[in-house]
Image (cartoon, helix red, strand yellow):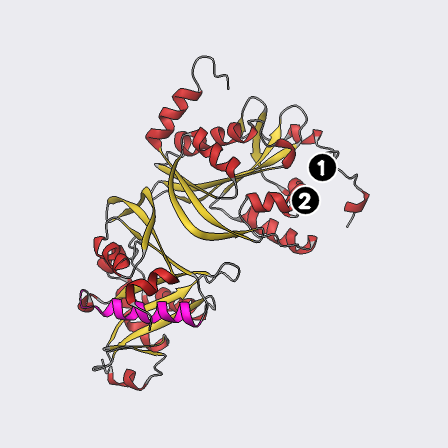
Amino acid sequence: MTEEAQPEGPFTLDTAKNLERVRFLEGDRIFLTPECADDFDVSYRWQHDREMQALGGVSYVPTSPERFRREFEDRLQNKNVVLLTIIMSDTGAPAGLINLFSIRQESGTAEWGLVLDQNYRRRGIGTEAARLLLGYAFDTLGLRRVTSETHSGNEGSQALQIRLGCVREATLRQGGWVNNQIVDRIFFGLLREEYREAKARWSGPSSAE
Amino acid sequence: MDTTGNLRRIRSFEGHRIFLTPECTDDFDNFYRWHNDKEIQAGDGRTYRPMGPEQAREYFKAQLDNKDFIRLSIIMSDSGVQAGRICLYGIEPTHRVASWGLMLDKAFWRQGIGSEAARLVLRYAFDDLGVRKMQSVTNSGNVASARFQESLGFVQEGCLRQAEIINNQIVDRLHYGLFREEFDKVVGKS
């Protein structure tokens, strides 16, 4: 592997070429592009960012690059998911991942999830990405409802969901395990009508945040 | 169908009117029948999809081969008739939470058979496997299931609004959870 040859630090890699990628959904400061083989390095790094994994509610499992490559490629082959990389429109730096999965057209439902690199949290990047994805889920796919899950250890995510208009629907007591701690699993739901109302609020004439 | 052979099967857990035995290929005929029963599938919160015998056999075999599941057949102690199936799965090694599911033949609904089977499996999960909490999911269209969960001490922990379409009706998905202490309180320590 040649990764040792690459410079340290999160995004000193050549990220500018990300700006040439397809802009599947475009926002003010970011765009979303289908996750692809070019994202392997950053994905592998995120997989080993312990805090990021904990916020995402998954156990931290050190994984060899070879094995991760297999998992990564399998993930990209999965047809029932929409995997998108969040790219900063100015620098091309990857800021995180946002996904729509368990898409069930017959019931009009899906789940979605978001993880952000530590350098891009608390700046409204997640909100912007989520609004783009929700627009796709409701306005393009015509879904009736989306579900998202977080846990009691991730207050940022709960605040984001509420900001988006999602409704807290379930608290599975002590249902999860994150960073050596038992946490509650928390589910949020957003119905199409609620999305429409929220969208009217956030895309008012000024559309300023 | 000769069901008396079932009486010779291993009794993993014994109740008053039933016993539980590891599910095996002999149980395929019932699996196939139940899988193609719209009412049973709706109770289970699944979209009804007819399945042919070949496909069903493969599916059943995959279920039996899945090591993450403990699958048991519910056998009537008097006749040897298989009344249903019950399973335990998703045991989390870190925080000891597990899930379970139950399916009963319609001939055995509303007779307390499910309750007897559930108590045996829950007791096993808590006492032998060291599970701290059991969880299950049902839907708002299945009132009997919600009542049943509550009769076992399960607490409703959430309601995902309009999350499913079952038999052409939009229903909520209900999450239930039960800690060991809550179960002990309801059924009494054994």
Q: Nearer the viewer, residue A76 or B23?
A: B23
Q: Nearer the viewer, residue B165 or A178?
A: A178
**What's the amino acid at mark 2?**
Arg
Q: Secondary structure at mark 2?
A: helix
Residue B54: image x %, image y %?
A: 36, 67
Specify the farthest residue to the right: A5
**Residue range of the region highlighted in magenta in the rendering:** B110-128
Q: Quadrant of residue A170?
A: top left
Please state if A106 lies on the left or on the right of B105 as rendered: right
Few, some or many residues within 10 Å of mark 1 (<14, 14–19, 20+): some
The answer to whether the residue labelled 1 contacts the one labelled 2, judged by CB atoms less than 8 Å apart, is yes
- Residue at coordinates 46% horizontally, 46% vertically from top-left? A80
Q: Is residue A135 visible?
A: no
**What's the amino acid at mark 1?**
Pro
Q: Is residue A70 visible?
A: yes
Q: Which residue is mark 2?
A: A45
